[in-house]
Image: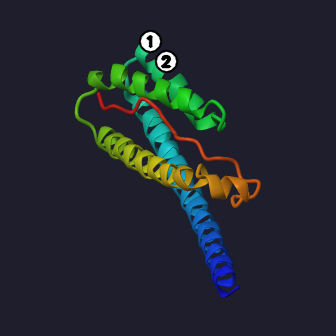
Amino acid sequence: MVVSIVLVVLVVLYVSWTAGRLDRLHARVDAAAAALDAALVRRAAAARAVAGRLPPGPDRQALSAAADAALEAGPVNREGVESDLSRALRSAVPQLAPDPVLAELATAASRVGLARSFHNAAVQDTRAIRLRRLPRALRLAGHRELPGFFEIDDMPG
């Protein structure tokens, strides 16, 4: 009888700890997603400024269109639009002489890479817990969606 009670208490403690951990991990994913979104917006704004300094031509139009699309993108098509912006940047930026706007763009691009890494690490940790049998069986995550990774082409030029 005592062993049964101790076992039940241990299971309840484990379930409670796991539910709390999932809550904290989801909060971490939300914070990382917000930081990633802010970094992507800063990069798109810097890309728009760089596009204004390019000589008229197809690269300027492509970069301007990609930056505008990135600033207006919703969560569904965000990865593709951001990858398009990365490709447009690689194509257009070599045409510019050293410029302070380029330094701002380089900083924004490196922050996107860091924010994406932090976001994907938080998603990986959350998914590792969520995909275990017990949290799935007891629906410890409630009705929250399983977070997804954010994969874009963000390789520098």
Q: Residue at x 67, y 75 (%)?
A: 12
Q: Residue furthest top?
A: 58
Helix, strand or loop for disc 2: helix
Q: Residues within 10 Å of mark 1 (few under 14, many from 20)?
A: few
Query: What is the x, y in percent for residue 126?
Result: 55, 54
Quadrant where the N terminus sits is bottom right
Q: Residue at x 44, y 20 (%)?
A: 60
Query: What is the x, y in percent for residue 33?
Result: 55, 51
Total of numbered circles in the picture?
2
Query: What is the x, y in percent for residue 100?
Result: 29, 43
Helix, strand or loop for disc 1: helix
In the image, residue 72 above or below residue 33: above
Amino acid type assigned to the residue bearing label 2 in the image: Gln
Q: Which residue is mark 2?
A: 61
Amino acid type assigned to the residue bearing label 1 in the image: Pro
Dots 1, 2 in contact, CB < 8 A: yes
Which of the 4 image quadrants contains residue 73?
top right
Q: How far is the residue under mark 1 from the one under mark 2?
A: 5 Å
- The one nearer the camera, 64 or 19, is 19
Q: Residue at x 69, y 58 (%)?
A: 141
Q: Which residue is mark 1?
A: 58
Residue 57 shows in this picture: no
Determine whether, in the image, residue 97 is placed left or right of residue 108: left
Residue 104 shows in this picture: yes
Determine whether, in the image, residue 48 is placed left or right of residue 155: right
In the image, residue 153 above or below residue 130: above
Determine whether, in the image, residue 128 is placed left or right of residue 108: right
Query: What is the x, y in percent for residue 39?
Result: 47, 48
